[in-house]
Image (cartoon, rainbow, N blue to C red):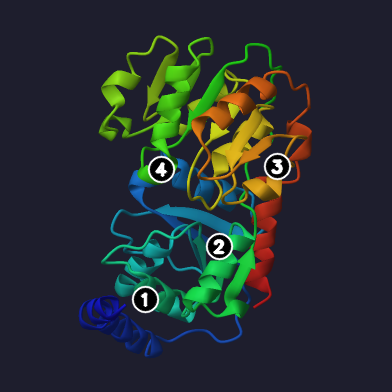
Amino acid sequence: MLKELLIFNLLYKWRYLLAMAKSKVIKTTKNAPFTTITYVAREVDKEWIFGAKVKRLASFSDLDAQDYYHNKLRELPNSDGYFFIFPQYFCRAVRHNPQILQKKIIVMFTHTNWTSSFSKTHIIWCLNKVDKVICLNNDIKKQLIEDGLKPEKIEVIHIASCSDYFYPHERVTGTVGFCSAYGERKNPEIIYELVKNMPHRHFYLIGKNWDKFDKYEELIQFKNFTYYNNQDYEKYPSFYNLIDIFVSPSILEGGPVPVLEAMLSNCFPIASRTGFCPDLINHGENGYLFNTDADYKEVMDLIEKAALQTTNVRETVLEHTWKNCSNKIDQLFLNF
């Protein structure tokens, strides 16, 4: 904790204080109507999930909303409000765009991801300067409050997907799918064990950076495994329609959004109890849940059970659309 404070106070805090001072001398029009929102991400996010989120949230807004991408998060367009898809993006942007502190700001927080540069101390201090922080589930809300974020700043909104973009299919093949970038919190070991120990089922994985997995070379040699590396988001709907059962074994998530996308595609979900999965999935009805420390053999059993299910999964999550989510964000901006 002391190290965090020293790094933040010596290397970063002064930059925010300078931005705050600059913002106070910028002329603003008082009591002007709120009409415009800029959804902010980086250029490199355009073909990935973050880019898809801001594009869709902006397109479904009833206000004058636009998506904006800049790798260094500079030169933000003039707007009445700004939505940042990731807390680090707000932190970086405000240093170069002090004028945004005169406007309404909402930041989405999916899950904890503390680093030496963006520590808990650093991120919480910055988030206490914005108007609202959107969490994807109540567990993250509770954690942020314990970490020092003011409770009145937090709103829980389950992130959404598009019920037209992700279309349903009949489950007939019993194939299994995963969707994520590689990372330790994605629980890659359980994916490896499932593929290795269920040769009678074919597994598909869409994501990126899986070549960093220490068992990658062995994984891709399995005949019952297909890897789609770094695909454009436009290909995701056809991917979900290749599979009947979707497995999300992550140890920590805010969403994960692919679970919702898969459910809208009528895949039967099997997910770890993290993020909004316990909110979307009623165990034994429209999916199965397992603990984050579960053994792969437990998940194997759930896959076999899922292959027998006939539930219309899509019908259980149709309320979680981009339109509904975007309208909730519109109202947040208008009501504070």
Sequence-first disc among 2 and 3: 2
Residue type for callout 1: Thr
Q: Which residue is mark 3?
A: 281
Residue drawn at 31 percent across, 63 percent down: 74
Sequence-first disc among 4 and 3: 4
Residue 180: give x, y in percent of width and height.
44, 36
**On residue 33, which mark appears?**
none
Check contact, mark 1 vs mark 2: CB within 8 A.
no
Residue drawn at 33 percent across, 31 percent down: 210
Could you tell me which secondary element the residue under label 4 belongs to?
loop
Mark nearer the viewer, 4 or 1: 1
Residue type for callout 2: Ile
Residue type for callout 4: Lys
Could you classify mark 3 by the number of other residues whose Cα lies within 10 Å: few (under 14), some (14-19), or many (20 or more)? many
Residue extending furthest toward the left? 10
Could you classify mark 1 by the number of other residues whose Cα lies within 10 Å: few (under 14), some (14-19), or many (20 or more)? some
Could you classify mark 4 by the number of other residues whose Cα lies within 10 Å: few (under 14), some (14-19), or many (20 or more)? some
Residue 312: give x, y in percent of width and height.
78, 27
Sequence-first disc among 3 and 1: 1
What's the distance in space between the residues labelled 4 and 3, CA to CA?
29 Å
What's the distance in space between the residues labelled 1 and 2, CA to CA?
16 Å
Please tell me in which quadrant of the rendered image residue 68 appears: bottom left
Q: Which residue is mark 1?
A: 121
**On residue 140, which mark appears?**
2
Against 30, residue 136 (above or below) is above
Visible in this render: residue 115? yes
Sequence-first disc among 4 and 1: 4
Residue drawn at 32 percent across, 67 percent down: 118
